[in-house]
Image (cartoon, rainbow, N blue to C red):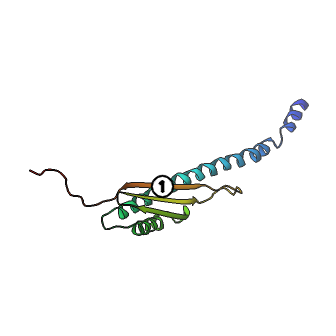
Amino acid sequence: MTAFLRRMHGDRGAASTQLVLVVPALLLIALLVVQFALVWHARHIAQYAAQRALAAARTKDGSAAEGQTQARRSLAALGSRVLTTPSVTAERTATQTTVRVDGTVLRVLPVPGLVLHASGTASGPTERITTPTGDQP
């Protein structure tokens, strides 16, 4: 009986020690999952804003400034908390329009120096009126 009691005293506090070691690791893993889900979501927001801006900027009467305005509206409606410090660049030529939306992702993990970025790019032909060339029937 005394050997049994000695064995029982040797395991005292083992569950508390295991809990102290395992719970922080599980919390870190959960926060990493949330952080990278936010990165994924921010990339989709940036891509959506770039596509909306392209639709506004590439029209016949559109401009790069109108594309930037549309991108900022889309970002304000969807991602002002997830995609912080966004920047929008729009370039429009006679044949091609390109919009790029960049930003920094909201940080969940308090890791110094951890800065995650998300961006979206949309490009397409600029709408213009053309006349057919060649012989017409």
- Dividing the picture into quadrants, the one containing residue 54 is bottom left
Q: Classify 10 Å Cα crowding around label 1: few (below 14), some (14-19), many (20 and above).
A: many
Give the total of numbered labels. 1
> Residue 85, relative to residue 113: is it above or below?
below
Q: List the single residue furthest toward the right.
A: 2
- Dividing the picture into quadrants, the one containing residue 81 is bottom right
Q: In the image, is 20 to the left or to the right of 4? A: left
Q: In the image, is 132 to the left or to the right of 74? A: left
Q: Residue at x 70, y 56 (%)?
A: 113
Residue nearer the viewer, 32 or 122: 122
> Residue 2, relative to residue 121: is it above or below?
above
Residue nearer the viewer, 29 or 52: 52
Residue nearer the viewer, 108 or 132: 132
Q: Position of residue 91 (x, y in %)?
A: 43, 61
Q: List the single residue furthest toward the left.
A: 137
- Quadrant of the image containing the N terminus: top right
Q: Position of residue 110 (x, y in %)?
A: 69, 57
- Residue type indicated by callout 1: Gly
User: Circle 1 is placed at which residue position?
Assistant: 120
Q: Residue at x 58, y 60 (%)?
A: 104
Secondary-structure class at tag 1? strand
> Residue 71, relative to residue 38: is it above or below?
below
Q: Residue at x 30, y 64 (%)?
A: 60
